């Protein structure tokens, strides 16, 4: 009787095991992955199309800062494409560690670019030498390193599902993302406050930089609001958080390139100088000369 009972239960147990090892219902589908991957791939194609021309321009200008940002942009774009294309990893058995490592690397690349640009905006010396480069990346490297270490402890030490979208009720996850969004929102808010105060001459005189700061302030402010709602398991907050994530992974790197690097790769230096002068004039930086 015991032998027959084992044969009766074994098919049921095998079905349960098979279903548990398959992808859960909350796993992102092909359309979601395509919505992330296609823009990321198109940006890589765009960078590759102008690679030879841009490398020639970088070697001619010999700007260490721009070379470093351009290399970091390429690295971040490649990591972002891998992250967007491998969404299925987060709900595939045996891929949890790989997914978390990939997510950490992708986050660190984008965050390093973002923090480096913030450090550039907040410093008073805008030279392009090695000293400025070292100072900027020392600040951003310290902040990004601390951020990665903290998130690695959360993910691998305490098992917090920071990068698993299907986990929507874990308090540690929302606490970490709320902390991140709060810091970035306050930082961009401070940049905008300085820009519209009497101390704005301490910041670089390029209106495009402040358009960048305004948009990033709005993005991270919305992300902070979404995290607050997500922590309460409100459906709109979860939807808004996902939308912000899609926009960030598909639009941030192209937006950064257009704001900080595109003008640098202009064919003629005169066009670049004229563009800077026109933006400064439109922003009213020369109004005092007529008073």
Image (tube, rainbow, N blue to C red):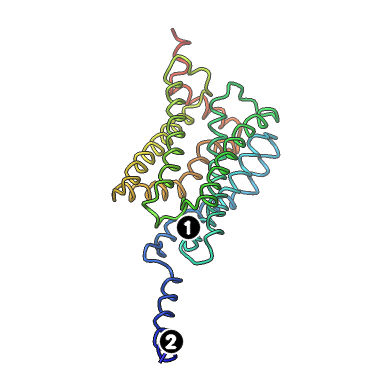
Q: Position of residue 114 (x, y in %)?
A: 53, 38
Label 2 SS: helix
Give the number of the mark in front: 2 or 1: 2
Where is residue 43 shown, x and y percent of the image?
Answer: 52, 51
Image coordinates for residue 279, horizontal then vertical, percent: 47, 26
Identify whether 165 is placed above or below 287.
Answer: below
Residue found 29% across the figure and 51% down from its top:
235
Q: How many marks?
A: 2
Q: Nearer the viewer, residue 223 or 13?
A: 13
Q: Residue 156, image x and y in percent? A: 54, 52
Report the residue marked by disc 1: 37
Secondary structure under the numbered disc 1 in the rendered image: helix
* Crowd rating for badge 1 (residues with CA inside 10 Å; few <14, some 14–19, many 20+): many
Quarter of the image where one finds residue 68: top right
- Looking at this rendering, what residue extends furthest in the top direction? 291
What residue do we see at 56% from left, 28% from top? 273
Q: What is the CA distance from the residue labelled 2 to the residue labelled 1? A: 47 Å
Above or below: residue 77 compared with residue 95: above
In the picture of the structure, the residue carrying the numbered disc 2 is 6
Q: Are marks 2 and 1 in contact (CB under 8 Å)?
A: no
For residue 148, above or below residue 17: above
Residue nearest the viewer, comparing 182 with 270 = 182
Which numbered disc flags the more N-terminal residue, 2 or 1? 2
At label 2, counting other C-alpha atoms closer than 10 Å, the crowd grade (few under 14, some 14-19, many 20 or more) is few
């Amino acid at each position: 009787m015991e032998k027959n009972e084992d044969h009766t239960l074994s098919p049921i147990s095998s079905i349960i095991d098979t279903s548990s090892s398959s992808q859960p219902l909350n796993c992102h589908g092909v359309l979601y992955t395509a919505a992330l991957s296609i823009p990321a791939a198109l940006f890589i194609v765009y960078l590759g199309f102008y690679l030879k021309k841009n490398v020639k321009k970088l070697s001619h200008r010999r700007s260490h800062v721009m070379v470093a940002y351009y290399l970091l942009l390429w690295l971040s774009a490649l990591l972002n494409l891998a992250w967007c294309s491998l969404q299925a990893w987060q709900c595939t058995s045996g891929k949890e560690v790989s997914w978390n490592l990939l997510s950490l690397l992708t986050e660190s690349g984008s965050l390093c670019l973002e923090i480096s640009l913030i450090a550039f905006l907040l410093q008073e010396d805008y030279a392009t030498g090695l000293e400025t480069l070292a100072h900027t990346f020392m600040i951003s490297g310290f902040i990004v390193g601390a951020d990665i270490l903290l998130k690695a402890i959360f993910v691998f030490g305490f098992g917090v599902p920071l990068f698993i979208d299907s986990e929507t009720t874990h308090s540690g996850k929302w606490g970490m993302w709320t902390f991140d969004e709060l810091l970035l929102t306050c930082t961009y808010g401070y940049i905008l406050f300085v820009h519209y105060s009497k101390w704005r001459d301490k910041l670089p005189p390029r209106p495009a930089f402040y358009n960048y700061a305004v948009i990033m302030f709005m993005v991270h402010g919305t992300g902070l609001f979404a995290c607050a709602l997500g922590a309460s398991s409100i459906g709109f907050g979860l939807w808004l958080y996902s939308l912000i994530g899609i926009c960030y992974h598909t639009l941030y790197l192209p937006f950064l390139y257009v704001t900080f690097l595109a003008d640098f790769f202009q064919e003629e230096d005169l066009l670049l100088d004229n563009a800077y002068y026109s933006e400064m004039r439109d922003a009213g930086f020369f109004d005092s000369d007529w008073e």
